[in-house]
Amino acid sequence: MAQLKRRLGLYAVFTVSIGAMIGSGIFVLPGLAFAVGGPAMILAYLVAGLIVFPAALAKSEMATAIPRAGGTYLYIDMAMGPLMGTIAGFGVWFSLVFKSAFALDGLGLYLGLFTNLDELTLGLAVGVGLLVVNLIGIKESGNIQAFLVTVVFGLLFIFIGGGAILVDSVNYQPFFPSGGSGLLATAALVFVSYAGVTKVASIAEEVSNPARTLPVAIITSLLVMMFVYPAVTYVMVGVTPPEILRGDLTPLATAGAQIFTPWVVTAIAMVGVLALASMANAGLLASSRYPFAMARRGLAPSIFARVGTRSGVPVLSLVLTGVLLLVLVAFVPVFELAKLASAFQLLMFAMINLAQIAFRSSKLWWYRPKFHAPGYPFVPVAGLVACLVLITQLGLQAILGAVGIIVGGVIWYQIYGRSRAIKESAFRESVRQQGMARLLELTAEALNEDARRVAVIAAGQGVDSSLLRVGRPLAGSEPGSELVDFLEAGPGLGEKLDRYSPDLVVASVVEHDARSLDQLPHDRDVVLLSGRVPGEIDRIAVLGSGGPFDVLKICLAAKLAEQEGASIRFVHVLDTNASRAQVRSLEKFHSELAELVPVPSESMVIESDDLMAALREAVDDADLAIIGAPPGRHLFTDLIDRIIHDLAIPVLVVRVAEEEGRTTLRGFLDRFTTTRVSPRDATHHD
């Protein structure tokens, strides 16, 4: 796999983060924000920064655990799976490109203050220049970023110092012209100003000493901007008449004209150009890493994962992003799209907080961050709720636009990524582990329950002694346990079962009439025997791990093995692209089962793309196999039939009773509490 070069130090990373924030948030948005919330926009910038803080902490933590290119996309993908990762990848990619295009548009506005050149032409020319700079290599781009941010910061502090002594207190009255709702709406509008603070995580793979550099750069840059934004807007409001500031698209230059001489205003306009160029550059730099990261996880064509041999940058990913940026500048009203970017950034920050919760709760062996965000779980939960509240303040159009990007991500995943993506996630692993822990508890309880009312049904003439050998250990020997013997399946079977009301039904499979046994009650546990149990049983193979039928399967295997003096082999077949985490999870589950069963046992986790060959290998020296069938009205599926016919040993098919009131939600949860690998996994059905 192509690797990016670690070249960026602390100041370069800090300036990339600052550069992604210090742009339209100061040079363009304040006039619009003032039109919405009046002087309260000063406080709105602070509120927005506070809402960003939990996600900044979460992302700092995740970046030290996963210092790889991709940032938001990668963390959400690994935390909640490839579908959510696809949505995040497209969403953050588009929002960053939209924001960069907005910056280039604003750059044209500021250049227009002292030149007659066409604004669109200038914006496109600068966009092409930034694309070329980034294609040269990350180090050169990082050096330019550091220079731009240093110059912009210097002049901003001159603006703050020069204007603070000239503010007119009358301009701050009334401070809340639109009340609390106006404050929240303004905070939602300016939220995009902080979006760049965590985008630096997308270049984590190119950062020197990421465990220290990333948290320090992210948190420091956020704190700095939480001071700069309110300080600049405080001066802006204080020195500019409200009727002039309201809706102004070059508010910093307008405010500067109230304080400084014309040549200083020209300098401010030039600083605006530099700041917006810095923002566009940082956005291009960070957003170009999203197609690269998606390609490395199978959600985009692999060609986008290639890096230049000399420059060390993902060339095609960068070109694609640059072309999209130029198209937006040329043909799309990007200022309107900036609001959509803000809405989706809020959604992404909410998902980042959720991703941190998923990682922490999963207790994955590989998730070992070197920086732990304080205040867990209260801080990420508060950040999640706050982001969702702000989304409601952006209006229906922005929300629908974000939904449109979500739908596009879902469609892309279904068409392209579903069959190619790396499907493991911390959320699935967390819920899977919780499900397996619950299965262990239920198995322990079932093994201690000796008495069970069992009905044995003969599919042919007479009672098969093999069925009695299967049913007897499950019936137990406690007073009140009873082995009920029905001689033949056929008309009236349902009435007899209702009369005896057994806990478990044991029957044999007649090859020419196997599907007729689908009439067995779906509200009872059922065990079907295909073939005849051999005279001696030395080893029982239990096929599958983590399904809803595990408790009955293991209980049956344990009691039968104890009766026969046999051992147990727990078998699970994985695809060859299964992760090491899946293998380790199954082996751990098998070892915990071994501590519960009263007989010797062993684990066999096989990685193979040929399911039937793997199963034949697993049962080669076994005398009996036990598999599970999914709950429902039908016992047999094509897969179950294949296993029964392909294996050269008797097979017991276990089906647990279908639960009353089973809902779609319960079915969804069952999917996550089972160890799903692929449709070829005969040991599991979900």
Image (tube, rainbow, N blue to C red):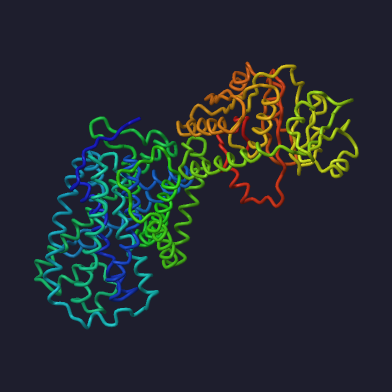
Instruction: Tell me how many marks there are.
Output: 0
| Image quarter of the N terminus | top left
Above or below, 203 against 273 in this view is above
Quarter location, residue 656: top right
Give percent across and percent down for residue 441. 59, 41
Query: Can residue 586 be seen in this snapshot?
Result: yes
Position of 395 with respect to 2 (left or right) is right
Identify which residue is drawn at 45% across, 43% down.
426
Residue located farthest toward the front when viewing the structure as drawn: 479
Position of 535 with respect to 2 (left or right) is right
| Image quarter of the C terminus | top right
Give percent across and percent down for residue 130. 23, 47
Position of 365 with respect to 15 (left or right) is right
Looking at the picture, tell me which residue is in the foreground, 84 or 50: 50
Quarter location, residue 568: top right
Quarter location, residue 225: bottom left
Identify which residue is drawn at 75% across, 21% down.
533
Query: Can residue 330 be seen in this snapshot?
Result: no
Looking at the picture, tell me which residue is in the foreground, 504 or 159: 504
Give percent across and percent down for residue 334. 35, 58
Identify which residue is drawn at 66% across, 51% down.
663
Above or below, 540 against 121 in this view is above
Give percent across and percent down for residue 654. 70, 33
Identify which residue is drawn at 30% across, 37% down.
315
Looking at the picture, tell me which residue is in the foreground, 490 or 11: 490
